[in-house]
Image (tube, grey):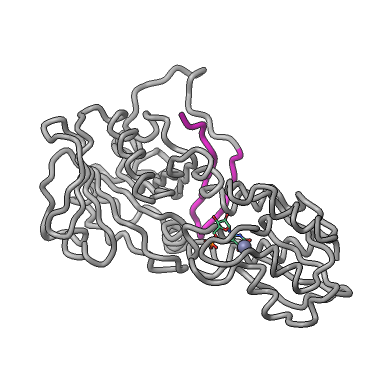
Amino acid sequence: MTDSDYMMCALREAWSVKGFTAPNPAVGAVIVKDGTILARGATAPPGGDHAEVAALAKAGAASHGATMYVTLEPCSHWGRTPPCSDAIIRAGITRVVYAVEDPNPQVSGRGGAQLRAAGIAVTVGVGREEAQRINEDFFYSISSHKPWVSVKLALTLDGAIADSWGVSKWITGTEARQRVHELRGYHRAIAVGAKTLQADNPKLTVRHGGGTDPVRIVFSSTDEIDRASYFYRHSREVQSILVVNNSAYSAGISQKEGIHRWYTGCDDRREGIQRFLSLAWSEGIDSLFVEGGSGLVGSFLEARAVNRVYLFYAPQILGGGQKGLVLPPMPMNESLRLTNVTYTQYGEDLLLSGLLPRT
Ligand code: AOF
Ligand code: ZN
């Protein structure tokens, strides 16, 4: 087995806890000696062990003289937990291979430097691309001080998100919908528009695949909430926020009937989104999953406030000419073009995902 093979095991460990570690990145570690994996570890929920410490605890005294593969630079600071670098040195690990530097300004290179200073051989960059992908939200938000934003739509082949009678349940099949639950769990908050709340009464919970239930956010132009909605009735279970984009209300934050109300103080959709994002970051929301409807997703795209797009295409045609996205027309050479595009099949549906540039 090569360095990349062992790193692949560590990356698998990291993926297994994605959605359970926020605001910490999801990290995996494996400890190897004489060609044998002695132990695996992954980041525990905040306040719990980091991946390295979890793996060291399992390996015990055997980690003396072993190599550690870890998907992020080991931390060197006192946060909620003690520095991993100290634990690695104490355990007698002689070589550390990590995938990518920790962008946290409290670490960023110091973890690696501390290991080297203790005489440990350090290799950096094995599996870098995937390690960055796992924590793309963390990497983006910690350096830009803005929440990472993903948008998701389920579409027919002719680009519809509902039939001409407004029925949208269900365009995609079970496997795709399970994947959506997993994606919800990867984000700190889920947002929908008031129209979607009205039409679909979504629960906005994580029901398959795990992950912590995200904060629920509804965008509206008034501060009226449908009292029969799941969002209203279950607002005390997790933080629930109504974002009101309307200059008739002055900008600010308040709380009423268990629901946080964020007033942007403006009418413009794009400006409202930018104000919302600053507020969200200052309130600790570092990633957001925008689930619809087409108006809200369109506004985020128009505001150039989207990092990642998830488009689920179902092999069906609805006709009627209804459009999935509400966006002003763009000439061909100014279109929103995704990069790093991947295509994955879920059941009979196709998930197309890619990145967009952010302003
Ligand atoms: C690691 N291994 O598994 C993770 C790391 O408050 P703390 O002590 O939990 O530290 C949080 C920071 O530690 C976090 O912002 C990130 O820089 C790093 N995460 N580091 O060595 C891990 N999850
Ligand atoms: Zn650590």
Q: Quadrant of the N terminus?
A: bottom right
Q: Give the image location of residue 102, x and y in percent.
A: 63, 50
- Magenta region: which residues? 340-359
Q: Give the image location of residue 60, x and y in percent.
A: 73, 82
Residue found at x 36% / y 39%: 277
**Closest to the observer, 215 or 52:** 52
**Closest to the observer, 201 or 250:** 250
Q: State the predominant SS element of the stretch in magenta.
A: strand
**Is 62 drawn above or below residue 223 in the view shown?**
below
**Closest to the observer, 350 or 333:** 333
350 in the magenta segment = yes
Taking the image as shown, residue 122 lies to the left or right of residue 247, namely right
Q: Can see residue 165?
A: no
Residue found at x 43% / y 49%: 287
**Is 157 drawn above or below residue 99 in the view shown?**
above
Q: Give the image location of residue 312, x and y in percent.
A: 45, 48
Q: Give the image location of residue 190, x and y in percent.
A: 35, 52
Q: Quadrant of residue 354?
A: top right
Q: Quadrant of residue 322?
A: top left
Q: Quadrant of residue 173?
A: bottom left
Ligand 2 rendered quadrant:
bottom right
**Is 17 drawn above or below residue 286 in the view shown?**
below
Taking the image as shown, residue 292 lies to the left or right of residue 82, namely left
**Is 188 drawn above or below residue 43 in the view shown?**
above
Q: Residue furthest right?
A: 34
183 in the magenta segment = no
Residue found at x 61% / y 69%: 42
